[in-house]
Amino acid sequence: MEWEIVIGLETHAQLSTASKIFSDSSTAYGAEPNTQASAADMALPGVLPVMNRAAVECAIQFGLAVDGHVAPASTLARKNYFYPDLPKNYQISQFDEPVVEGGSLTFFVGETESTVALTRAHLEEDAGKSIHENITGPNGNPATGIDLNRAGTPLLEIVTEPDMRSAAEAVAYARALHALVVWLGICDGNMQEGSFRCDANVSVRRKGDTSLGTRTEIKNVNSFRFLERAILYEAHRQIELIEDGGTVEQETRLYDADADETRSMRTKQDAHDYRYFPDPDLPVLTIAPEWIEQVRASMPELPAARRQRFETALGLTAYDASQLTMQRATAEYFEAVAQALPADQAKLAANWVLGELAAALNRAELDIGHSPVSAPQLAALINRIVDGTVSNKMAREVFGAMWEGEHGADADAIIEARGLKQISDSGAIEAMVDQVLAEHTAIVEQYRAGKDKAFNSLVGQVMRAARGKANPQQVTDMLRQKLDG
């Protein structure tokens, strides 16, 4: 407990453009190696880069979404380093004049709200990919192949301040950022295909210290689970190292998921090692105020705005509103359900979307866009709870049948076919209550002697007599009336 973890994240979001950032080559995933690399991507002599307008608009959208400053003028720079899959021996990126500066992202860690400040977001091109498996050289020896299909793919690198203090908070931020870029439509968020990759900068310091410790960077973590495990391992490694009298080296490390450990990759370079300088082949990126306003007008309602609307207009808690707006598809599904219910039933709709529906989707490993139960169908079921046709317990049975496609997932047909209609006739309920009171006089005496649990026992007896079909609220009210009145 005497140590504090300090975490900052650098996230590469692949932008959802049809072509690369400086050429017209396709960005489609899964093509045969080196079939989507043009002369410009391979840096052949005589070619010049041309900025992709769509990539810039993605960056503008992000800047507006996080309330950052979209720079009216920013510079494209060359980041110089040698690696086999970097054909130019430099990467076109941005250094001291990024397209977006500042901004913040607010999210929940469990039920606690947290805000992380952003340093910047800048445009850059991706490198190619080194392939080490199933590659043989001219003599049949193992070799490394170079696939340049990814070279030049547009990226938005989003950098935070070192504001996070736990692996759980870092994962919650990464999930919220992932949800935002997918919500905006600027990134498909497919982590398996490398569309969303996180680098974690991790250091430790004793609690109460204000200076930052030496950080290590864990590169290219492509799952939220691995991100958390990598941070926890690295923090523990650094603490043990310091307590044993060692010092943390500034370096880049890789996370090995099989061994659940981080391993040294290379000494971490500083900015001056990359010899940044403005790219002489690209002009200053100029973004006029009119362009920003055009982009703003085309953007969807943002998660924060919808979250606030769900709280103020529908009366949801901040936590429920946050959970419902983690994904745009979930927010739209919920809103379609809520709009088909009485105005005061939004909380019930939220409970079903975040509860029964979410659990079923999780078990089936489906996203909400592929739910077997549509929003109108779920709303029809919830309306039967509202009007007293079925109880919540019965409704869960109906939902299970709807999920399996029984009777075309029609709630009314399933209720009728299974005989699940709730007994709400007051005369019938009174008769069952009277019978239970007459047959269980000992429990009645216990209740009148002050044993409150006896009341629940009587409710259970009435529900058993009704085979679970009596309206629970009517049963409760009737029993209270008979016992206390």
Image (cartoon, helix red, strand yellow):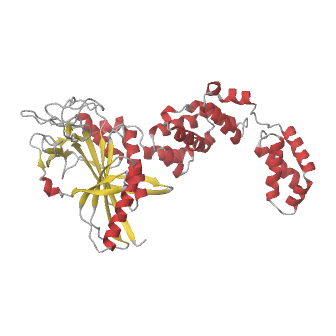
Indicate left or right for 295 with 87 as reference.
Answer: right
| Residue at x-position 26% and y-position 40% | 133
Residue 307 is situated, as x and y percent measured from the top left of the image, at 48, 46
Residue found 29% across the figure and 57% down from its top: 263
What is the number of callouts on the image? 0
Quarter holding residue 293 = top left
Q: In which quarter of the image is residue 194?
A: top left
Quadrant of the rendered image containing residue 472 = top right
Whether residue 485 is visible, yes or no, is no
Q: Quadrant of the N terminus?
A: bottom left
Task: Residue at 89%, 41% (x, y): give it.
Answer: 431
Image side of residue 332 versus residue 243, left or right: right
Query: Residue 164, image x and y in percent?
Result: 37, 60
Where's residue 103, x and y in %? 33, 52
Q: In this view, does 195 lie to the left or right of 171?
A: left
Q: Eyeballing the image, is 268 above or below 244? A: above
* Left or right, residue 166 beside residue 151: right
- Residue 431 visible? The answer is yes
Quadrant containing the C terminus is bottom right
Q: Residue 109: x and y, percent?
A: 46, 55
